[in-house]
Image (spheres, rainbow, N blue to C red):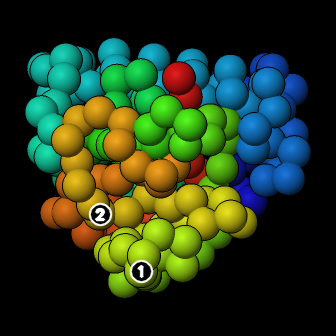
Amino acid sequence: MKQLALALAVTGAFALGVPATPANATQSYEARVTASYASRSAHDDMVATFGVDTVKPGKYLWRDVPASAGDERVVISLGDQLAYLYRGNELMAVASVSSGSDGRESPAGVFQILNKTPMHRSKKYDNAPMPFAQFFTDYGIALHAGANPGYPASHGCIRLPSAFAKKLYTVTEVGTPILIGA
């Protein structure tokens, strides 16, 4: 809960009056605006930090940021098909993603990691493997390793490059905020 409130405050949601609870802050209009603002700002941070304006499908960039910099948060840009990992106000990593395809779009808003499992199998989609799954909805949507063509191709989950998903899994915890913007 504390990390979600921090993510909302850092991204300007505090000024928008978004409640800092998962039940009220997930897919409200204010939460979607907050997440979209965060994803646009993250792109600028990527250019300033890594000197690139995109990451190729299946690839990621990572730099060490000390734990003392603050708590982690994940920002997803559905439009750019990129994931950003922050530690405090420092951009730590960026990776390509594959979000939900037409008719199975990934949800936008402010979420938090509800539970994690190193190897999950989908109950809905033919026992499909979901390595390093980090669930952020009650209906099975997660960040996880998977096919990463660089365009929306999932059933709603956010697929990550395998090596990035593994590293991300080690630095996040239940309660880590996830902001998903357009």
Numbered disc 1: secondary structure: loop
Does residue 61 show up? Answer: no
> Which of these two is toward me, 128 or 35?
128
Q: Is residue 100 above or below residue 49?
A: below
Residue receiving disc 1: 127
Q: Is residue 51 above or below residue 132?
A: above
Residue 164 is left or right of residue 12, and the answer is left
Q: Is residue 133 above or below residue 146?
A: below
> Which of these two is toward me, 66 or 129?
129
Does residue 4 show up? Answer: yes
- For the point 37% across and 63% down, the residue is 144
Residue 18 is left or right of residue 104, and the answer is right
Q: Give the total number of marks visible in the rendering.
A: 2
- Of label 1 and label 2, which has the lower sequence position? 1
Q: Is residue 102 above or below residue 16?
A: below
Type of residue at label 1?
Answer: Asn
> Which of these two is toward me, 22 or 103?
103
Residue 18 drawn at (x, y percent) = 83, 32
Residue 95 is left or right of residue 169, and the answer is left
Type of residue at label 2?
Answer: Ala
